[in-house]
Amino acid sequence: MTKVSFVEVTGTTYAVEADSGISAMEAAVRNNVPGIDGDCGGAAACATCHVYVDPAWLAKTGAAGEGMEKDMLEFAEDVRENSRLACQIKLTSELDGLVLRLPEKQH
């Protein structure tokens, strides 16, 4: 199991545990984390799972991938260097303890 913390702008934190191999978006949706909708089901086609990777985790998650993920982030609000689509972050044991911050509002 991989632990992931989703942190709202207000500081409210939703700590979830998920099986390795699923995406951070799937973990959020399965655990009813507000603000992560995943409308496209993880196809990187909607930006409703936009998150900010906590700076301490950027080296392990990497930056947004070229192509579909980066293109879709252009439609998200308040995109930053640490912006990612949660559907493109696959959970592994190396990401145990991952912290993802939620934007103020989603697209």
Image (tube, rainbow, N blue to C red):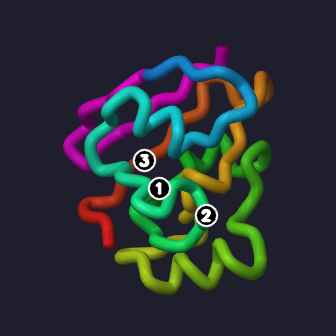
Residue 86 vs 84, above or below: the answer is: above
Q: Where's residue 67, x and y in %?
A: 74, 81
Majority secondary structure of the magenta segment?
Answer: strand
The tally of labels here is 3
Three-letter amino acid code at disc 2? Ala
Q: Amino acid at mark 3?
A: Arg
The residue tagged with tag 2: helix, strand or loop? Answer: loop
Mark 2 Cα shell of 10 Å, populated few (<14), some (14-19), many (≥20): some
Q: Nearer the viewer, mark 1 or mark 2?
A: 2
Cα distance in 3D space between marks 1 and 2: 16 Å
Nearer the observer, 61 or 107: 107
For the residues bearing labels 1 and 3, Cβ distance under 8 angstroms: yes
Magenta-colored stretch includes residue 13: yes
**Where's residue 48, x and y in %?**
40, 63
Q: Position of residue 99 (x, y in %)?
A: 53, 36
Task: Name the residue carrying label 3.
Answer: 101
The residue that mark 2 highlights is: 43
Q: How many residues crowd mark 3 within 10 Å: few (<14), some (14–19), many (20+)?
A: some
- Residue 25 percent location from the top left of the image: 51, 45
Lower sequence index among marks 2 and 3:
2
Q: In front of the other: label 2 or label 3?
A: 2
Q: Secondary structure at mark 3?
A: strand
In terms of sequence position, does the residue under pointer 1 or pointer 2 come before the other? Answer: 2
Residue, x 44% and y 83% (percent of image)? 75
Q: Residue at x 51, y 33 (%)?
A: 27
Q: Quadrant of the N terminus?
A: top right
Report the magenta residues as a range. 1-15
CA distance separating discs 2 and 3:
21 Å
Identified by mark 1, the residue type is Val
Distance, label 1 to label 3, CA atoms, is 6 Å
Q: Which residue is mark 1?
A: 51
